[in-house]
Structure formats: C-alpha cells, structure tokens
Image (cartoon, rainbow, N blue to C red):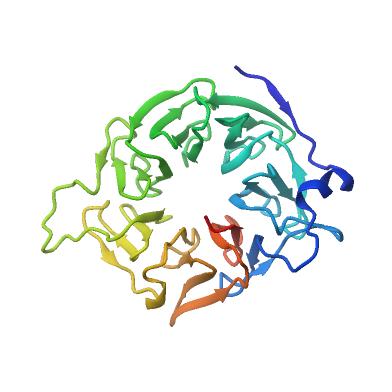
Amino acid sequence: MKYFLMTILFLTVGVLAGCVNGGSGSPTGGVFKSVDGGRLFEPRNTIDEDHTIAHSDVLSIAVDPSDNNKVYIGTKKDDFFVSTDGAQTWSKGSAQLKGIQNIVINPFNTQTIYMSGMYEGRGSVVRSVDGGTEWERVYVEPIDGTNITSMTVSPVNGDMIYIGTSGGTIARTLNAGESWENLYHAEKSVNELLIDAGDINTLYALIDGYDVVKSRDDGATFESIRDMERDYETEKLYEGTLYSMTVSPSVSGVVIVGTDSGVFRSDNYGQSWTPVDVIASTIGIPIHAIEINPHNANQLVYAAAKAVYTSVDDGWAITDTTSNRVVDVIAHDPVDSDVVYLGLRKAI
C-alpha cells in the first residue's frame, strides 16, 4: 500500500495562478495572525505580489515546535501550503490530498509530519520524514467518501498517532504508521481527538454533535460522557450541539467544549459541567473553534462566526476578522506565547 507521493514545495507563478490567484477584491479568508496574544488579528496570506491564499478554505494549521517560523496549513481544495517566515509568505506543497483536516508534527523529530485528507476520494494519512518534500501513504480507508476527521500525537511518543474517521472509527499506530489497531467505533463522525496533557492515559473524542467519549486507560475502553451516571441537581451536563473541544495544557481533567448554547467547562473528566461566562451575544452561535493557550492554562480563545474572543484580565478582547468567512481553526505558537493563528473557511 505504501508508495511515495512526490511533492514540489516551490511551484512557479504560472502553476499557482490557477487555484490561488487572489484576483480582484480584498482578502476574505486564508490565515490570520496575532502577535499580541490574540487581541488583534491581521491577514497573512501573501505568496508573492500577485498571488495570495486568501481565497483558500483553511481546515488545519500546525507550527513546527523546533522552528516556529515554519507553519503548515491544510486546505479544502488547494492541498497544503508552508511558510518559513512566520506566515509572512507562503509556498505551495503537494501531498496530493484534498480536505486536509489535520496536520500533526512529531514533537521529537519535526522532520516527520503527518497529514490526513482525501486521496482520490478515500480518506488517507500520509507521512513525510524529510520535512514535507516526499510523502508516503500509511493509512487508507477501504471505501470512497470516508475521511480522516481527527488526528493527534502522543506527547511522550512521537510514533504513537491516534486517528478518528467520519465513519466513527478510532484507531492507533504505535510505530509511526507501519501498522494500526482498532480502538473504538462510534455511531457518528469522530470530529476531534485530544489527549489529556496532565494524564496521558486519558483520551477524549468529540463524536459529531452529540457526545464526548473518553478513555482513562490508554484506549483499552471508552465511555460516553453524556451517559455517565450523575446527580443532575449538582452535576450538570453541557447544553446544545457540540462543535469544538479543547483540553488544558497542564491540568488533568479539564476539558472545554464549544456548542451552539455557549461554552462549557469540566474540571473532573466530564463528570460535571459549568457554563463559561462568555459574551452573551455569542450564545446561540455555533462555536466551531476553541483553544486554551498552551502557555497559559487560564487563557481561552474561541471563535463565534466572524469574531474572535480572547480572555484577558478584565474580560474578553474581541477581534472582528472583517471577513465573509468563519473561523474554523485556532492554533497557538508552541514557542511564542504572543502568537496565535486563525484559519478561515466559507460558511457551510
């Protein structure tokens, strides 16, 4: 099944013009960057003076932890782009994928990168061991139409990768994609996979819009958080349809979800939930992107449609992207606590 997919990171202007030419009008999407901790975001979409990624739907962002000037983005239709200057300029790459939902970098060997998306209509994971020049397909779905909707890497073992599919499968490799084992099958799409940073044997999976399942034993067993026994007088559940999820970068058991009824936080592995005091006008709007700052476990960033909200000492800093697109992904720089990236896409 394995074969190499050759990629050329630097294409000529003539090739680029077909799919990423900005054309007339102001930038509307692509990537936005903050250098002040999420208080102000500005577009960072330049390829060259004639070309831009502003019209690409950005579905995923990853920053190289060993060189934070190197940023990768995955798009819906335009494969992926890479920047080597902190998103000042971009170059096009090719993993021969569409719908790149996830980019994962091995934190112990950042030349090894994984991307997930659709290859000729089938959900696949591809791996590069040379920083993105050549790609090898290491996982493929058996039928057309099923994508890899979530992916994460163990914080202690860069060869341990977890994936979730739109068909509900959660699987894992312990050897960088050489072989895979099935862990769990859900009824609906696995939209997010996160490992508890304070308890690495705990894995959370966001199942479509209705549930979070968790494993406390490194994937051996899973349980539904929605169906857990609880005292509803004192242990409330989150409300609304689930759209996004994040976990604390340092505190065990802290998980936060974004819904269309607000933002909800649990401090005890999902047993009980309390609403976060967000701006009231965002309640009722689907929260598609939410992240806790990895440098500050008390700072939350979330996006409601075209606005971004960052928790600060005296409330929320609000940024209007002035875009006709919605924020789909938020990514913090792993080195510089002041740098935050947004990826925008057309509203579905």
Quadrant of residue 99 within the rendered picture:
top right
Residue nearest the observer in this picture, 266 or 290: 290
Report how many numbered discs are placed on residues in the image.
Answer: 0
For the point 57% across and 70% down, the residue is: 37
Residue 311 in the image, given as x and y percentages of width and height: 45, 73
- 110 lies above or below 47: above
Quadrant of residue 80 within the rendered picture:
top right
Residue 23 in the image, given as x and y percentages of width and height: 80, 60
* Image quadrant occupied by the N terminus: top right
Residue 282 in the image, given as x and y percentages of width and height: 41, 72
Residue 211 in the image, given as x and y percentages of width and height: 30, 48
Outermost residue on the top side: it is: 1
Q: Is residue 284 left or right of residue 130?
A: left
- 62 lies above or below 45: above
Quadrant of residue 77 within the rendered picture:
top right
Residue nearest the observer in this picture, 241 or 2: 241
For the point 26% across and 52% down, the residue is: 270
- 306 lies above or below 316: above
- 224 lies above or below 181: below
